[in-house]
Each structure stands twice: as structure tokens, then as C-alpha cells.
Image (cartoon, rainbow, N blue to C red):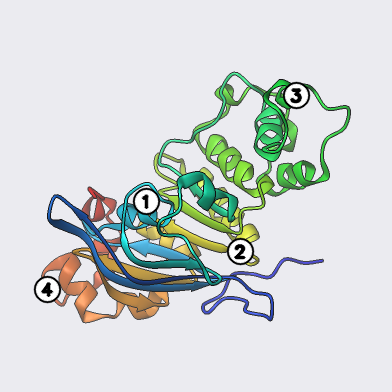
Amino acid sequence: MTTPEPKPGGNAGMSSEYLEIRGLSVSFDGFKAVSDVDLTVLQGDLRFLIGPNGAGKTTLIDAITGLVPATGSAQKTGVELLGKKVHQIARLGIGRTFQTASVFEQLSVLQNLDIAAGAGRSARTMLRRRKSVLPAIEEVLEITGLGDLRDKPAGVLAHGQKQWLEIGMLLVQNASVLLLDEPVAGMSAEEREETGNLLRRIGGARIVVVVEHDMDFMRAFASSVTVLAGGKVLSEGTVEQVQADPKVQQVYLGTAAAIGTALADPATVKESV
């Protein structure tokens, strides 16, 4: 069975899932880092979340995953996430990566995936070598391109490969919502290309939101884009629609000049919140 490609509006069907954010706000000591954000992402829509310094992009996904308290609503296919603990949200199929990959560096790629897949097993049996590899793990090894490295310690992997492993660990947990924070930061051009292709392979059948500063990467792989500024949604649409939006041009450049130049420079959109 072929996996559908991500596309604007998603690959909605009768059993499709969605992420729906309504009026979500986050405050720190009276400062509103995120203010009344509305956001809907359907399954199969590879959504990129961009914005200038202090826009609140990372804070927004922190709120969705329970890392910071928030008001409003964040629902996965009708199930409210706000107010739940981090582990409860993860069990609902919400997966999150950080700018630095969190893997067990002393363990092999296969052991990392096995631990991620074995949440229901006891700690005593987690590290035992299985007589056979779970089909779900074999599938993830193929999807991530890590099959030939299955017995290598995760610590010797290249930077990009560690990010792919972390994404793979979410996939073996059956995460249907992936929130990825700067997945290509520090990667080589080749690694960025491979990561984009990986997101395409997994994004057609899942909800994927990518916080990103690399605008060339965004233009190449996003199926839709949401722009945050000052903690609020400024613009939303396809890459072409967002780049043509005068409000976005004004925020990035302070002028109505072409946004392409500014968005090509990651230094103009470095996140601080």
C-alpha cells in the first residue's frame, strides 16, 4: 500500500485525525507569550510553523504537550489535551522532539527503538535482546534509512541520523501527531534533504507540525504554513500565499519588499520564546 503525499488541507477521510487549537494562551509572569491562537491541522497536511524572534512557536508546542500551563483548548480529534500530564498526552499519540535529539547514546539503534516500542514491558526485560525484531521496528528502520546501522551505538550516529532515530522512536510508539522543534538545525545540506524526504514519507498519514527557521527547507517541503508574530497567528496558507502576504512581509522586513530574501536568512527568524 502506497503512503499518500502530504498536501494542503490534508488527506482527510472518514477516520482522519486532526489537531484543533482554539483560543490558546500562555502567560509568564504577566507576559503573554502566546495569545488566543487558533490553529487547525488535518492529517496529511505537513504544516510548518514559522515566525520572527519571540513569536511563541516553541511555547505553543510546549503548551500542547503539557510542558507549560495554558488556557483555551487544544484537542486531538475531539480529546482535550490541556490540563493533562505530559505522559497522558504522550499516550494519546502526541509525539514531540526537541532541538537536541534525546536518544540513549550507549545503546544501539535497535535497542533505542525496542525501548520506545516496549512502553508496556517491565524495566527488567527492556534491554534483553529479542530473538526477532518486531515488524513495526523493521518498518521504522526502513522508513528512517537506519537499517544498516541497527547494531551501531546511537552515540556514533551523525547529527542528522540521531534526529531520524528520535523520530523513529515516536513512530514505533504509534504517535499520530508529531511536533518537531527545528529538526534540521545544524544539519548538512544532504541531511536536510533526507530529513525533508522522511517528513514527506511519514506526513501523508499523520499530523505533522514543524517549527523551523530554515526557510529554504520550509519552501521545499511544507504543504502549508502558519506564521506567528507576537504570540498571535499572523498569516496562514500555502508557502506562496504566506510569502505574498503584506503583513508577513512587514513583520519580517519592516517594509513591503519581497519576503523571499528575509525568509532565506535563518538569522532573521531566530526563536527566543
Label 2 or label 4, whichever comes before in sequence order? 2
Q: Quick one: SS at disc 1?
A: helix
Residue located beneath label 3 in the image: 125
The x, y position of residue 244, in whole percent, is 29, 80
Residue situated furthest top in the rendering? 106
Q: Residue at x 73, y 33 (%)?
A: 121
Residue 91 visible in the displayed image: yes
Left or right: 102 as drawn, with respect to 273: right
Left or right: 9 as drawn, with respect to 32: right
Gap in Å between the C-alphas at discs 2 and 4?
Answer: 37 Å
Q: Residue at x 46, y 51 (%)?
A: 180
Gap in Å between the C-alphas at discs 2 and 1?
Answer: 19 Å
Residue located beneath label 1 in the image: 62
Q: Quick one: SS at disc 2?
A: loop
The x, y position of residue 69, in whole percent, is 31, 53
Label 3 or label 1, whichever comes before in sequence order? 1
Gap in Å between the C-alphas at discs 3 and 1?
Answer: 32 Å
Label 1 neighbour load within 10 Å: few <14, some 14-19, many 20+:
some
Label 4 or label 3, whichever comes before in sequence order? 3
Label 1 or label 4, whichever comes before in sequence order? 1
Q: Quick one: SS at disc 3?
A: helix
Identify the mark at residue 206; answer none if there is no mark.
Answer: 2
Q: Residue at x 53, y 49 (%)?
A: 88
Between 163 and 239, the one lying in front of the other is: 163
Indicate the amino acid at tag 1.
Answer: Asp
Residue located beneath label 4 in the image: 255
